[in-house]
Amino acid sequence: MPGASRPKAALDSVIRKSRVHFYKPIQVAEILYRHRTVGGFELRDPESYRNPSKRWRDEVSRRLVGRASTSSQKFQDNLFERNAMPPEILAELGELNRRAGGLVEAYVYRSLQARLLSVSEARGYIAGTPPERFALRELVARFRRVPGLKRSIDKMYEIAVHALFAALVRALRVEVSLTVGNKDERILRDFEGFVSAVLGLSQARPAVARAARLFRAGVANAADRGVDMWSNFGPAVQVKFLALTPALAEDIAENAGSGSVVIVCKSAERSVIEAVLGQVGLGGTIQGVVTLDDLDRWYALAMGEAYREALGRPLLKDLEREFDGEFPGNRGVEPFLAERGYDSIAVPEDWQPA
């Protein structure tokens, strides 16, 4: 399409940089959809649609990917900066879109459909591979091979780590004991409400044992900072697959408070991470460093004959469930394309989703 090269390049950049939930491309598409079908705002004036477009985006993203953006307002507003989709480029896209009857909108949502198909194929590997043939490195490779999934590989690592660690803690039947060490019955009596409500103890039961558990901190974040998991038995867990700087190392330690931290990292990063933490005086905060080689070996052991039934099969079910909780499926996109009429738009060869 004549004159489309510059605005399409900007749109492709936004799509390429997006995680699988596609929040920013969806926001662009919904601005263009409202501009084409309703109007009432000027594309060169971002203040006329900046905030409403977040609501439009969230309505569609809840339907298509099951959740809305929780990123900071600053990160969301980066969409309209010069290195993303500045208003003058958006205006050019809007003109192209209006002339072509929604072509740009269709391109965004067909690109989302293609991205979610890649997600479904990765899920299919988890759900359809028997334990004896499953390999963590193959799952990792599937994310690395597809450009649209590489942006979300950190979240795939997180669920793989959490599923494995939680399964091992469960299989080992780890328990955490809580005991009142002060034998003064008076303080137990006077603060009985606190002891009961907060500690779950009493004079009659001054000690209790609970199953050890690991908890994930939440869903996708805009930045790879802080703690990804915490436990009821001590350490927090940080899954780290980007280069660790002293500033980020301090963030990890601060987010862990006074507790200890377990870092999960690429094998090649281990020595770098240990050196950086030592330089900034945080070496004592780190309880242990687990590498991808460790994870791969532990997954292989779990799927092996000795542990396959007790550990391997339940682990794959846990991994599948956590994958579904983190990544969207693609079942809702096709009806949406038909509803909007995007499936009947003739798309030029240079506007086919990559």
Image (tube, grey):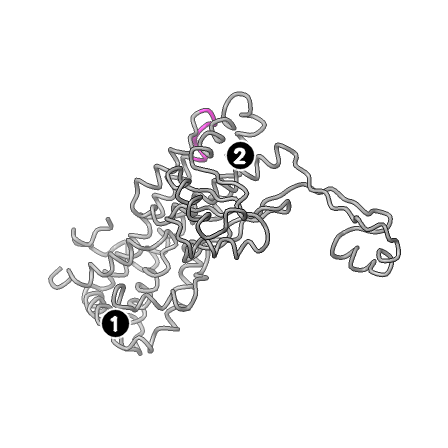
Instruction: Classify 81 as above or below 5.
Output: below
Disc 1 residue type?
Pro
Residue 87: which disc? 1
Q: Check disc 2 and report its element: helix, strand or loop.
A: helix
> Looking at the image, which is closer to me, 47 or 289?
289
**Residue in the picture at 37% in, 70% down:** 53
> Looking at the image, which is closer to me, 284 or 222?
284
Would you say 317 lies left or right of 59 here? right
Q: CA distance from mark 2 to mark 1?
A: 48 Å
Main SS of the magenta segment?
helix
**From the image, which quarter does the N terminus lie in?**
bottom left
Disc 2 residue type?
Leu
Q: Residues within 10 Å of mark 1 (few under 14, many from 20)?
A: some
Q: Which residues are magenta?
A: 126-132
Q: Position of residue 111 (x, y in %)?
A: 29, 52
Q: Check disc 1 and report its element: helix, strand or loop.
A: helix
Instruction: Classify 124 as above or below 28.
Output: above
Residue 315: which disc? 2
Q: Position of residue 282 (x, y in %)?
A: 50, 50
- Number of disc labels: 2
Q: Residue 129 lies in magenta, yes or no?
A: yes
